Amino acid sequence: MIINHKKIFYLIVIFFSIFFSFHVGAVEFRGVGSETYNGIKTTKKINATLETAKKNACTNAFDKYVQGMEESKRMIFESIQGPIYQNLNEYMSCETMIEENIDKKKKKVTVVMKANIDETRLNIEIKKNSKVFSTKSDDKSKLAMIFFSRTIDAQRSYDERVSKKKKTSSGVDINEEETDTGVTSSTTETSSTETGGSTLKKADVSMYKVDDNDTVKIEAAMKEIFTKARFEPRSGKRLVRKNWKKLRGDIVESLENGGSIPDEARWDIEDILIDKGINYVVFAYFDVGVPETDPATGSQVIAVALNYAEIMNLGGSEPVSLGTISGIQIRGKGSNNDIAKNNAIASASKEAGKRIVALINSKGLN
């Protein structure tokens, strides 16, 4: 028998390609399920009860995944959850039993199952059911991006002020002493002064530097997310380019002094974008942290956080806020600071983009 090694090699490659294509977008959850049986315990009855308990455990694992969904994403999911729950095997693999327990007294079978949920496929279903996904290419919602990235340039810390005080007293002390002949008294005169300063503690002050190179990377990462969600992302600074120099100056000054994007600059930008037929604008700024060293691996670690993002709907007579997003923080690792920072920026930007898309879609305005 002649073994075709090349054919075997290709079959192995195909197998692992299929295996990893599922698990790359999969997340693992464990679920608990139970079921009772009646009458006398038999092997057939236990096996049937066990299968039902397994199904209950797999459903429980999926329920846990759903409960952890971001709010705006879950709102869309709940509108399509019926068909998904009816075909759970298409959205997850749940074949591995972790624990099994048979309680003879209570006639109850309990199991713990491990489920690998295909998050990528679920995200596709959610996007397909958003209004923006179903619009024609000529009618795609135009979304402008006004993004900034700033890095801590200097930080001044103030310790609590300690003042040494020297006291001398001023007054008359009367000392009385009882004697055999009566009460006698003597006086001692002292002088008193007190010196010292304020006991108030100054707040720590951070100075920032806006980095346009990091801003470009954020915009590129988010643009990918917006495009896949069937929006038409546009660079905000290009749309307002005639006024950008002054607007940027006002924004940068505020951000570098620890503030946010000024309202006056936002309002001017919104007015220009409305005249250009833009549907949405996202104002956001990210904070890039100070490099650290991972004590376990020696790799460089940098945290990037979405400080603030607000999505404005420009389609009505007046701009309307759809909501704000914050609190996203991603730590990136790398052999040097640049790699660590780029990894953190890419991950934080993509996560922010996903939440922005989910928030817009949950409003059902497109």
Image (spheres, rainbow, N blue to C red):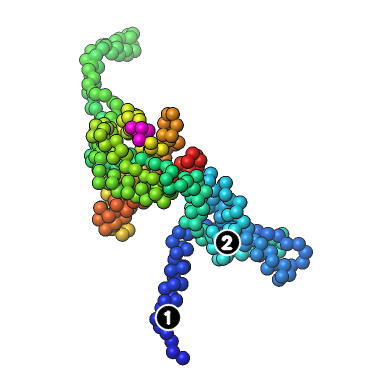
Residue 76 vertical placement versus 261 (above, below): below
The amino acid type, in three-letter code, at marker 1 is Lys
- Residue visible at 43% across and 87% down in the picture: 3
Residue 169 vertical placement versus 209 (above, below): above
Report if the CB atoms under discs 2 and 1 are less than 8 Å apart.
no
- Stretch of the chain drawn in magenta: 272-276
Percent of width and height locating residue 131: 50, 44
Is 245 magenta? The answer is no
Q: Is residue 252 left or right of residue 13?
A: left
Q: Residue 232: tell me if it is visible.
A: yes
Q: Dot 1 corresponds to which residue?
A: 7
Is 274 magenta? The answer is yes
Q: Dot 2 corresponds to which residue?
A: 89
Residue 3 vertical placement versus 138 (above, below): below
Q: Is residue 44 left or right of residue 300?
A: right
Please, what secondary structure does the residue beneath circle 1 have? helix
The amino acid type, in three-letter code, at marker 2 is Asn
